[in-house]
Amino acid sequence: MQLALAALALIAFGMGIAEFVIMGLLPNVAADLGVSIPDAGLLVTAYAVGIAVGAPLLTASLARLPRKPTLLVLTGTFLAGSLFSALAPGYGALLAGRVVTAFAHGAFFAIASVVAADLVAPNRKARAIATVMAGHSVANVLGVPLGTLVGQAFGWRATFWTVAGIAAVSVAVCAALVPNIRPRRRVALRAELGVLRSRQVLLALALSVLANGGLFAFFTYIAPLAITVAGFTEAAVSWLLVLFGLGVVVGNVLAGMAADRWPMPTVYVLLGVLTVVLAAASVTSHSKLALAVTMPIFGAAAFGLTTPLQMRVVSKASAVNPAAPTVASAVNIAAFNVANAGGAALGGALIAAGLGYPMLGPAAAAVCVLGLLLALYCGRLDRADLASARRASGSVV
């Protein structure tokens, strides 16, 4: 089963590059296609919207099918979208290629998260999900910086050709290593959707939106901010992304371990750190050293949140119906990318309004503060539910 988790992590690695490498190449893409930086930022928004729409729709359609063929179809679609992006003749075609890739991306992570959790013992579910997400994290350390270097040296299309090559390998690895698992029981779509009426599930989804909205309001525009405000060269942006990616890996590993024992305290700590780092960005973004020092902290806090938030949605959905967590998992992936799209749009609006890149950090921090307040409220509900369950257990005894 470790090999199966490794295979899923490899696919996540390729998809992580596809999603985030565009952020390091925004100036290159904008110049080559003759569009503004905010318009190029819509390539990030389109990918996020594609995941937000595609994840629940595709997952709901495929939830009753065997897992392995489903994952193969999604990985093959990811390959097709990457090829289309590499060959795109213009901005509109590239936008379409991003959306196709995003559809597969969202459904893959939703199903892979549930498969990973099903492969291990109950006390290791968060770590299993973190293993899959580690591929996404390593993409930020190696894939995104290297993809950025390739794009700067040979043109952004070369980066998408590289992603397509990784996608082709992913199809083969998925076919060889992922077991052919059927869902534990056949669940009606109505039952899958029914868990979305739970207050706890809906609040968990809202928490994902707020926690990640602040992240992407700032991170989407990290390349132009680093170049125009901090004074980094274009080539040095790749090394800045390496620092960010190292933080992502450390944060993902530590958060996966902590979330198995202290799920909500892990969220509180990471959201608090993320808020402070973003609030300080109005100052740190003016200094090369300060920005370089804060980037790994930013990465650790921001992407460390992914595992406990995904685990919370799956666990709250399973509490409503143990056989129906898959669509809820997909909707959380959609929520993450609604935040991606909304954060990128918020950042673009601030830039277009002439407020400047340094204002992105404080605006993003304000969104994270709302997320922290909601997280504290969710923790209060958890404690109330636990007390109610104990009282009920005592009355039964």
Image (cartoon, rainbow, N blue to C red):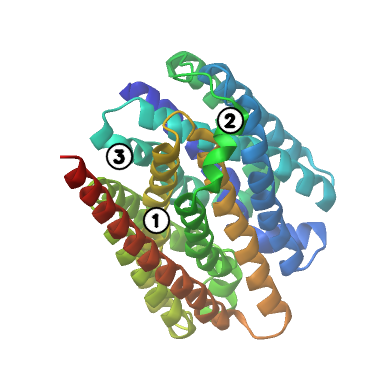
Q: Is residue 242 visible?
A: yes
Label total for image: 3
Q: Indicate the secondary structure of the residue bearing disc 1.
A: loop
Q: From what the image shows, is residue 251 above or below residue 104?
A: below
Identity of the residue drawn at 52% across and 20% down: 67
Which mark is drawn over residue 73? none
- Within 10 Å of disc 1 (Cα), the crowding (few <14, some 14-19, many 20+) is many
3 or 2: mark nearer the eye = 3
**Position of the C terminus by quadrant:** top left
* Left or right position of 29 against 180: right
Q: Which residue is mark 3?
A: 127
The numbered disc on residue 305 is: 1
Residue on which the image places disc 2 = 167
CA–CA distance between discs 2 and 1?
Answer: 26 Å
Q: Earlier in the sequence, mark 3 or mark 2?
A: 3
Which amino acid, by three-letter code, is at mark 2? Answer: Ala
Can residue 155 be seen at all in this image of the molecule? no
Residue occupying image coordinates x 17% and y 46%: 394
Pinpoint residue 102: horizontal percent, then vertical percent: 65, 42
